[in-house]
Amino acid sequence: MNWMQQAKRFYILLSAVLILLGLVVTIWPLQSLYTICYLIGGVSILFGVAKLVSYFTKDGTTLAFQFDLIMGALALVFGIILCFHPGNVLSLLQLLIGLFILIDGLLKLRTALDARRMGLNRWWSVLAAALLSAAAGLLLIFNPFAGARALMTLLGITLIIEGVQNLFVVIYTNRHFRQGPDDLDIVYEE
């Protein structure tokens, strides 16, 4: 299997995970918020403890481990905050996810414009999905809704849109490349 097929499969799997995560967050918004915070907090605490143990069991003056004390302490504090104050972390989580989705939507705008320039028939559908994704990212960043439930529902819908958009892009571009570019002339000489 070549690298292009592996990348396509990974992209499809990632898109399916985004859609599934979006459905879970949309159906159970508040429980999802606390679960996400507890999971990230727990992993951060484990990471912090591992870094601290690494620092104190190894020679802390070596280059490879010189920042383990600081990184471990920061990860530990971050994890504790996430586990004991998950509601307060919502605004940061919302901002980071919103920025990621906005940037991805803007990059997909470029993909749509490149598809138009290449003469692909349905470039406008990639453009529409990219605009929808970017708008959802902006909504997450600026939080026009009151309450965590509405915000998490918006996050879930945004993740679903992002997953569907990614699936559409990978399937559409795969079809285009399977058919082969129309303007490519190959000359074979012996």
Image (cartoon, rainbow, N blue to C red):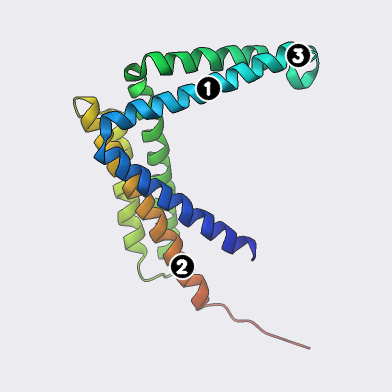
Is 70 situated left or right of 150 in this image? Answer: right
The reply to whether residue 117 is in sight is no
Check disc 2 and report its element: helix, strand or loop: loop
Q: Nearer the viewer, residue 14 or 134?
A: 14
Type of the residue with mark 2: Met
Expressed as whole percent of the image width and height from the top left, the position of residue 173 reads 46, 65
Q: Earlier in the sequence, mark 3 or mark 2?
A: 3
The extreme bottom residue here reads 190
Label 1 neighbourhood size at 10 Å, few (<14), some (14-19), many (20+)?
many
Residue marked by disc 3: 57
Circle nearer the viewer, 3 or 2: 3
Q: Is residue 183 above or below residue 90?
A: below
Task: Tell me the residue at 38%/50% (across/down).
Answer: 163
Identify the residue at image location x=40%, y=64%.
116
Identify the residue at horizontal 42%, vertical 70% (top origin).
119
How crowded is the residue under tag 2: few (<14 C-alpha within 10 Å), some, or many (20+)? few
Residue at 32%, 54% (x, y): give it: 129
Circles 2, 1 touching at the beta carbon (< 8 Å): no
CA gap, disc 3 and disc 2: 57 Å
Label located before the other in sequence (2 or 1): 1
Of marks 1 and 3, which one's residue comes earlier in the chain?
1
Q: Position of residue 162 (x, y in %)?
A: 36, 48
Tell me the kind of residue under disc 3: Thr
Residue 2, position as x, y percentages in the image: 64, 65
Please state, as top left, top right, bottom left or bottom right, where the C terminus lies in the image.
bottom right
The residue that mark 1 highlights is 44
Residue bearing mark 2: 118
Describe the element under mark 3 as helix, strand or loop. helix
Provide residue 9's location: percent of width, then percent of height: 52, 59
Q: Residues within 10 Å of mark 3 (few under 14, many from 20)?
A: few
Up-down relation of residue 12 to residue 187 (above or below):
above
